[in-house]
């Protein structure tokens, strides 16, 4: 039995389909180069869940999760001026 089915994550097809749609939307926004900060924001929540899942339940897949997070961080750094207002006190 794998960690994905043990977590109950794959038991709800509606939630799984929503996650796939959000991944496709964020990837499309990044690929077309329009609304990149929005795509990065959506992707940040997804990547957080991926990292948390691999840290807590399936450490074997931690490497690809870190690579994806580093790629996200690189793109977020390139668009940091878009997020500057969120980080100001």
Image: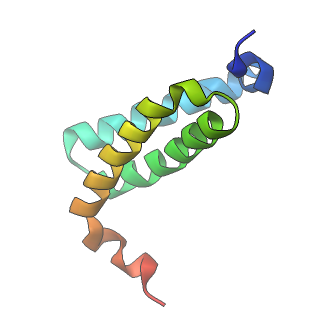
Give residue 74's position: percent from left, percent from top. 26, 53
What residue is shown at x 55% (from left), y 47% (from top)? 48
The answer to whether any part of residue 8 appears in the image is no
Give the vertical position of 28 relative to 38 (above or below). Answer: above
Give the vertical position of 84 relative to 50 (above or below). Answer: below
* Number of numbered callouts drawn: 0
What residue is shown at x 76% (from left), y 22% (from top)? 12
Give residue 9's position: percent from left, percent from top. 73, 26
Give the vertical position of 78 relative to 16 (above or below). Answer: below
- Is residue 88 left or right of 13 when viewed as pictured? left
- Is residue 6 left or right of 47 when viewed as pictured? right
The picture quadrant where one finds residue 79 is bottom left
Name of the residue lying farthest toward the front: 60
Q: Depth check: give the residue in front, 74 or 18.
A: 74
Give residue 65's position: percent from left, percent from top. 46, 35
What residue is shown at x 27% (from left), y 62% (from top)? 77
What residue is shown at x 34% (from left), y 47% (from top)? 70
**Quadrant of the image containing the N terminus:** top right
Q: Depth check: give the residue in front, 62 or 30.
A: 62
Give residue 57's position: percent from left, percent from top. 70, 31
Q: How is the image coloured?
A: rainbow
């Amino acid at each position: 039995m794998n960690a994905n089915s043990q977590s109950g994550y794959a038991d709800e097809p509606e939630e799984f389909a929503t996650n796939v749609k959000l991944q496709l939307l964020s990837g499309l926004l990044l690929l077309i180069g329009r609304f990149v900060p929005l795509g990065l924001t959506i992707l940040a929540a997804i990547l957080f869940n991926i990292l948390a899942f691999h840290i807590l339940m399936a450490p074997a897949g931690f490497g690809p999760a870190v690579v994806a997070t580093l790629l996200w961080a690189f793109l977020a750094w390139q668009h940091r001026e878009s997020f500057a207002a969120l980080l100001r006190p």
